[in-house]
Image (cartoon, helix red, strand yellow):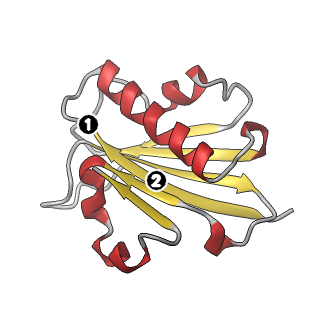
Amino acid sequence: MPVRGIRGATTVEENTRDHIIMRTTELLEQLVARNSIDVEDIASAVFSVTEDLDAEFPAVAARRLGWIYTPLFCTREIPVPHSLGKCIRVLLHVNSEKRQEEMIHLYLHDATKLRPDLEHHEKDRYYKST
């Protein structure tokens, strides 16, 4: 079975444990639902946060959702000047028979600014929400 990558990102208003867990949970739940993923098919997940977020690991949200046996990794984004702040990103590696173009990538809240090039594809593989 092929492994597919699914991207997602969201932002928080505050660098607090509750906000990080809440927005990461929202993102993961929507990625799983929109892509019809079984948690056991998630091979691994890589989370990154911008340097202004350090109140909690986003992987905590995945564990709370029951991703007990899924390998999770958290890292920090490269601090590029003028880039989007208070941002949480995730790259899911999913075992799936779907083609890569069938995967739905999500950009929520202010993270919609990350991919302005996707405006044409919004109805297809990408979902943007504010």
Is 111 positioned to the left or the right of 103 in the image?
Answer: left
Q: Amino acid at mark 1?
A: Val
* Helix, strand or loop status at disc 2: strand
Q: Position of residue 35 (x, y in %)?
A: 63, 53
Secondary structure under the numbered disc 1 in the rendered image: loop
- Residue type at tag 2: Gly
Which of the 4 image quarters holds residue 88? top left
Q: Hey, which residue is sitting farthest left in the picture?
A: 82
Residue at the image position 58 percent from the left and 51 percent from the top:
34
Label 2 crowd (10 A; few <14 / some 14-19 / many >=20):
many
Write the residue at 38% across / 26% down.
22
Relative image position of residue 13 (x, y in whole percent): 19, 34
Is 71 situated left or right of 112 in this image? right
User: Is 79 drawn above or below residue 124 in the view shown?
Assistant: above
Q: Quadrant of the N terminus?
A: bottom right
Side (left or right) of 37 relative to 97: left
Q: Nearer the viewer, residue 26 or 74?
A: 26
**Residue that badge 2 annotates:** 8
Foreground of the two, 89 or 10: 10
Task: Please report the residue visible at 50 percent of the width from the left and 27 percent of the height from the top.
Answer: 61
The quarter holding residue 20 reads top left
Asked if disc 1 and disc 2 are in contact, CB closer than 8 Å, the reply is no
Residue 72, horizontal then vertical, whole percent: 60, 37
**Mark 1 sits on what residue?**
12
Which percent across, then down, holds residue 108?
A: 35, 49
Residue closer to the observer: 62 or 30: 30
Above/below status of 15 relative to 101:
above
The picture quadrant where one finds residue 121 is bottom left
Q: At 35% from the left edge and 46% from the top edge, which residue is drawn?
A: 10
* Mark carried by residue 113: none
- Disc 1 to disc 2, how far (Cα)? 14 Å
